Image: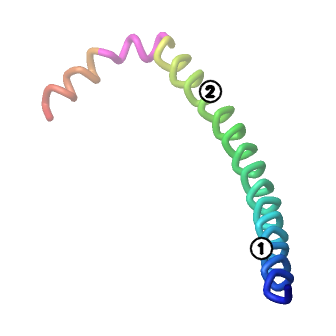
Amino acid sequence: MRMEEEEIRLLRATVTEQRRQLRRLSRELDKKDEEIGVLKEKLIIATDQVLEMRSSPSWKITRPLRLIRMMRR
């Protein structure tokens, strides 16, 4: 009987520790999800800026110059 009680005590301690780890990992996951959301927003903004720049008149006008420079490389 004593052996069973010790085993139960160890199992309960294991479960308690695993629950603690699960809570910690869940908090970390929430933080990472938040970071991903922020990075997605930054990516959208950067993509919009690039598209805006490439559709600008100055980008279109300087296209031949960029092509010449690329050909020289």
- For marks 2 and 1 on the same chain, the one whose residue lies earlier in the sequence: 1
- Frontmost of labels 2 and 1 is 1
**Furthest residue toward bottom:** 2
Residue occupied by mark 1: 14
* CA neighbours of label 1 inside 10 A, class few (<14), some (14 to 19), many (20+): few
In the image, 45 versus 56, the foreground residue is 45
Q: Quadrant of the N terminus?
A: bottom right
Amino acid on which disc 2 is placed: Ile
Q: Is residue 58 magenta?
A: yes
Q: Give the alpha-carbon distance from disc 2 to disc 1, as whole Å.
A: 44 Å
**Residue 19 locus on image (x, y percent):** 82, 63
**Front in this rendered view, residue 14 or 63:** 14
Question: What amino acid is labelled 1 in the image?
Answer: Thr
User: Above or below — where is 21 with respect to 62?
Assistant: below
Q: Position of residue 8 (x, y in %)?
A: 83, 76
Instruction: Count every numbered label the image shows and give the total.
Output: 2
The image's mark for residue 3 is: none
| Point 76% across, 66% down: residue | 18
User: Magenta stretch mostly in which secondary structure?
Assistant: helix
Identify the secondary structure beneath mark 2: helix
Query: Could you say which quadrant of the image residue 67 lies in?
Result: top left
Span highlighted in magenta in the image: 57-63
Q: In which quadrant of the rendered image does the C terminus lie?
A: top left
Q: On the rendered structure, is 40 left or right of 6?
A: left
Report the residue marked by disc 2: 44
Task: Judge whether residue 16 is colored magenta.
Answer: no
| Secondary structure beneath label 1 | helix
- In this view of the protein, which residue sits in the foreground, 10 or 63? 10
Estimate how packed mark 2 is, as few (under 14), some (14 to 19) or many (20 or more) residues with alpha carbons within 10 Å: few
